[in-house]
Image: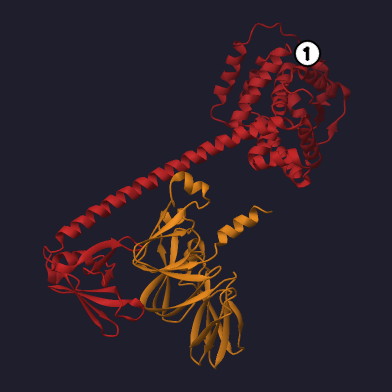
């Protein structure tokens, strides 16, 4: 490139005591011996290349500062073509300084990128660590809460929710479900929880247990099950959600540790209402995959301890899969999750690892219950 | 156009006297009072896209108001926060303003938006900065008093105190000391300003005030 191909004039600025305010805008001309700056008022400044000190800076980091030796005159320009013009017009006089600036600029950019990358990495680690620390704190916070908190949330959630159908009061049906719960209750991981059973007339193949032990079983579930042990399998899974306090854990995860702390220290009606809503939402939709797996494990343990065949849980899931039926919403991810088969296999594997146990049949008039359900 | 900054520094406001044919552009909601003869025209703050960008990343309004005088009239402009207002005369020069600082300008002044970098974001000042350039007066406001520093080398400013600076000034975010003293001194991150150039600072930090209020409610 020749000097006559280059841009000769640049919009620039000057720092000098000789202009009002100490600075003003100038038009910069690259001449053979140096830079000529002309202010809008016509005032001229000249800075020779052989006396020029260069520096890169400014808000953009790409601004050239050209100074004289005693720094009484500084010309600055940010035009992208200014560097090339300076290089060509100054011949070799500024070559060393320009090379040094380029090296510094590259080094700064490289350092900047490294810092940015490290900052992003640190931020990622902080968020990742923070998330798991919050989960761990949530678990600890939930364990310190009295069971009455679960009961309060469950009670409020139950009173606010649409149950999806009328309540069934047929003693044969209700007592059969209660019998299953009574078999499992002594083996619950959380003592002091009182389970209350409601059977709702609904075709939904569903059951859920709210925090505190309020349990709802839909007739659709009883109709779909082939044996009372299959019903017991689902009930054990749902009871496990309550005994492991998954509802409250979900509340804490959703609303933060502060909610748990405030629930502990104060009677905050608003917070309880919020918790009830979150608890209800958690029980009716689905828990996280981690909590579902925990409920599977705990359900199998409870069934085994109560001498009810735990394989029935896996068999019921398989049956639903074969039938292509809707599964309980609370365990919905079983059918929809791509690792459905893995989960069933996991339950089967867990059952196989259990110590030998003499399983007993449940003392339920299963045929009578089925007949009543047909009416 | 005559102007006077009154009630300084705590409750500053700008009294503008417009002659027929004169106009001033001001931030939306900046008008406190005006003569009934003034015509108010609201427009996008530099085009729709730029206005949205300013709103999202610059902390400025999407719209600006133009106050046109057909007869001699007066207008009082003010800001939401208690604090001072400064006027700067641009003579083909530019000035960067931190989000929310712009108050008003004369017709020869252009408003633009420029990438400020991740350092600015980490410093709590957003990814973009407002740049005013051209010819004419520009008024900007601050929380608390405004003081000016002529920076020749390096100067350290606590984040949240910088209101505006010239384009010749380089801004970096860093720690005021070692890691321990930086975190336990309460200073946290600071802005390292490198001249030459002029910086405008506010004597109070609004983020610090909100943090203080939050800790008491």
Q: Colour of chain A?
A: red
The quadrant in which residue A328 appears is top right
Placement of the N terminus of chain A among the 4 image quadrants: bottom left
Mark 1 secondary-structure assignment: loop
The local crowd at label 1, few if under 14, some if 14 to 19, many if 20 or more residues have their Cα within 10 Å, is some
Residue A329, visible in the rendered structure: no
**Of residues B190 and A348, the one drawn nearer to the viewer in this rendering:** B190
Q: Label 1: which residue? A: A362
**Of residues B121 and B110, the one drawn nearer to the viewer in this rendering:** B121
Residue that appears at 73% across and 31% down:
A208
Where is residue B85 drawn, in percent x and y?
52, 75
The quadrant in which residue B217 appears is bottom right
Q: Colour of chain B?
A: orange
Where is residue A252 drawn, in percent x and y?
66, 38
Placement of the C terminus of chain A among the 4 image quadrants: top right
Q: Chain of mark 1?
A: A
**Of residues B19 and A73, the one drawn nearer to the viewer in this rendering:** A73
A263 to the left or right of B77: right
What's the image's color scheme? by chain
Residue A200, visible in the rendered structure: yes
Residue that appears at 70% across and 23% down:
A234
Where is residue B23 drawn, in percent x and y?
49, 85
Where is residue B136 drawn, in percent x and y?
42, 81
């Amino acid at each position: 490139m020749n000097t006559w191909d280059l841009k000769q004039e640049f919009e620039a600025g000057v720092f000098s005591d000789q202009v009002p305010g100490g600075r003003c805008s100038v038009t910069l001309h690259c001449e053979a011996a140096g830079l000529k700056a002309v202010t809008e008022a016509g005032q001229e400044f000249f800075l020779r290349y052989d006396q020029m000190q260069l520096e890169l800076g400014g808000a953009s980091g790409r601004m050239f500062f050209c100074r004289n030796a005693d720094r009484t005159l500084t010309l600055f320009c940010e035009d992208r073509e200014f560097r090339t013009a300076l290089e060509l017009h100054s011949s070799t006089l500024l070559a060393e300084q320009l090379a040094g600036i380029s090296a510094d600029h590259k080094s700064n950019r490289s350092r900047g990128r490294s810092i940015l990358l490290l900052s992003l990495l640190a931020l990622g680690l902080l968020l990742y660590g923070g998330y798991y620390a919050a989960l761990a704190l949530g678990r600890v916070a939930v364990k310190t809460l009295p069971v009455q908190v679960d009961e309060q949330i469950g009670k409020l959630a139950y009173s606010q929710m649409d149950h999806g159908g009328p309540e069934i009061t047929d003693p044969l049906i209700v007592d059969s479900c209660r019998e299953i719960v009574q078999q499992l209750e002594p083996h619950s991981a959380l003592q002091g929880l009182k389970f209350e059973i409601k059977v709702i007339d609904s075709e939904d193949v569903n059951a859920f247990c709210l925090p505190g032990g309020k349990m709802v079983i839909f007739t659709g579930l009883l109709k779909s099950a082939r044996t009372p042990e299959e019903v017991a399998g689902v009930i054990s899974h749902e009871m496990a959600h309550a005994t492991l306090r998954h509802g409250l854990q979900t509340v804490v995860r959703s609303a933060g540790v502060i909610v748990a702390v405030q629930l502990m220290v104060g009677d905050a009606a608003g917070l309880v209402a919020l918790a009830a809503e979150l608890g209800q939402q958690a029980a009716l939709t689905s828990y996280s995959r981690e909590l579902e797996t925990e409920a599977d494990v705990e359900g199998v343990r409870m069934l085994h301890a109560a001498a009810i065949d735990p394989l029935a849980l896996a068999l019921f899931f398989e049956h639903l899969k074969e039938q292509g039926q809707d599964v309980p919403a609370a365990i919905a991810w079983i059918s929809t999750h791509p690792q459905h088969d893995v989960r069933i296999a996991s339950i089967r594997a867990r059952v196989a690892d259990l110590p030998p146990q003499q399983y007993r049949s449940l003392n339920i008039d299963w045929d009578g219950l089925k007949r009543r359900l047909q009416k | 156009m005559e102007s006077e900054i009154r009630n300084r520094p705590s409750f500053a406001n700008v009294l503008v006297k417009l002659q027929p044919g004169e106009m001033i552009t001001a931030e939306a909601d900046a008008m406190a009072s005006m003569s009934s003869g003034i015509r108010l025209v609201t427009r996008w703050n530099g085009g729709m896209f730029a206005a949205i960008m300013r709103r999202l990343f610059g902390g400025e309004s999407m719209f600006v108001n133009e106050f046109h005088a057909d007869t001699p009239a007066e207008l009082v402009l003010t800001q939401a926060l208690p604090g001072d207002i400064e006027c700067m005369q641009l003579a083909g020069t530019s000035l960067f303003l931190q989000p929310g600082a712009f108050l008003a300008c004369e017709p020869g002044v252009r408003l633009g938006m420029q990438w400020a970098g991740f350092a600015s974001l980490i410093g709590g000042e957003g990814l973009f900065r407002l740049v005013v350039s051209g010819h004419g007066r520009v008024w900007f406001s601050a929380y608390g008093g405004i003081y000016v520093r002529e920076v020749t080398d390096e100067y350290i400013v606590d984040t949240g105190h910088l209101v505006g600076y010239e384009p010749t000034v380089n801004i970096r975010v860093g720690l005021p000391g070692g890691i321990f003293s930086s975190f336990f001194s309460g200073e946290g991150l600071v802005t390292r300003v490198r001249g030459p150039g002029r910086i405008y600072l506010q004597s109070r930090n609004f983020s610090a005030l909100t943090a203080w209020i939050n800790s008491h409610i």
